[in-house]
Amino acid sequence: MIPKTVVAGSIHRHEGRTVMKRYILLVGVLSIFLFSVAGCTSIVRRPEVFTEDFEKGRLDLSRWEVTSDGDFTEAIVDVIDVAPGGETDYRLRLRANTVGTSNPLKYLGVRSMNTVNLNTAKTILFDLDWNKQTNGSYLTASFYLCPAKSENPKEENDWLKFEYVGVPPGRNVRINILAKVDGVVYPLHVDWGPRDDNGRPFGYPLGLSSHRISLFLDKSRMRVVQDKEEIFPLSKHNLEFTTAYIYLQMSSGTNYPSREIYFDNIIVRSPSLD
Ligand SMILES: [Ca+2]
């Protein structure tokens, strides 16, 4: 702002020192005011309290901790570039091979090191890529909010979960939004997709691209949007916790060859702009 003051002062250089001092004072006060307004505006426009795009090309262990539950022939949690050619598109990869293992279900993922404060409204966004599954049987891709530190949030007493569940034997999915409150699971939204001629639900084809999931949460209500389509209208969630870790997790049944899913572009915003 110093150059502005000098320029403004030069315009009035014939009006006397008193006028000049008042003018400089006025410009100074206006400058402070404008800086304050600009500062407030930037806070409103940039309300993200947490972002993760994995573009460092590696899993940042100061932000994420690997979690696993069960036995694996191969278990990989890392960040890889999935873009073809010379471009880059780094994502979190969860990969499991369970051929020859014993536990019926295995869980693999990451937990955020910091918690999300749900005392004030938040919008949480993430990209979920089901990937090119040829057989999604006993495969899930899950986003959890859970107040407890755990190797497997599913075993904890309280959580909220958004989940794709593979429909055998293809690559379609069911969509589950479940809440667990004091040890009891409540289905908030369970969609097994359209039914075939025999009345069996065959799930939704996800295509080959990532899907953008948006969760709006305040202390009592939640709204979920998938790819700009509202799949859970603003309704009560009955959750009792007010801080939670973010978990990104896959699970697999036993005796499946390597399968992998991807997460990317996690954003936590406060307040919501959606
Ligand atoms: Ca990325």
Image (cartoon, helix red, strand yellow):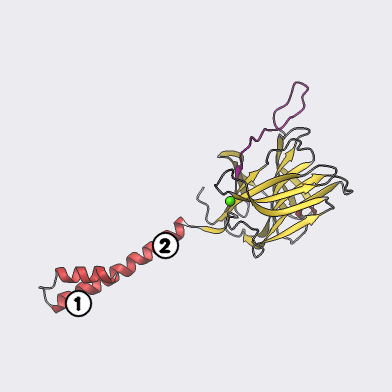
C-beta proximity under 8 Å, tags 1 and 2: no
Answer left or right for 212 relative to 66: left
Q: Nearer the viewer, residue 227 or 256?
A: 256
Please tell me in which quadrant of the rendered image residue 49 appears: bottom right
Q: Nearer the viewer, residue 10 or 117?
A: 10
Q: Is any atom of residue 125 visible in this view?
A: no
Magenta stretch: includes residue 199: yes
Please tell me in which quadrant of the rendered image residue 33 appears: bottom left
* Residue 40: image tag: 2
Q: Is any atom of residue 202 visible in this view?
A: yes
The kind of residue tagged 1 is Lys
x and y, in percent, of residue 58 in the image: 64, 58
Secondary structure beneath dot 1 equals helix
Q: Residue furthest top?
A: 197
Magenta stretch: includes residue 88: no
Tell me the chief SS of the magenta region. Answer: loop
Indicate which disc, 1 or 2, sits on the residue closer to the N terminus: 1
Q: Measure the C-alpha gap from mark 1 to mark 2.
A: 29 Å
The kind of residue tagged 2 is Cys
> What residue would you read off at disc 1?
21
x and y, in percent, of residue 137 in the image: 79, 38
Q: Is residue 194 above or below residue 221?
A: above
Specify start and end residues of the magenta stretch as a single range.
Answer: 193-213
Q: Residue furthest front?
A: 86
Image point (57%, 40%), residue name: 227
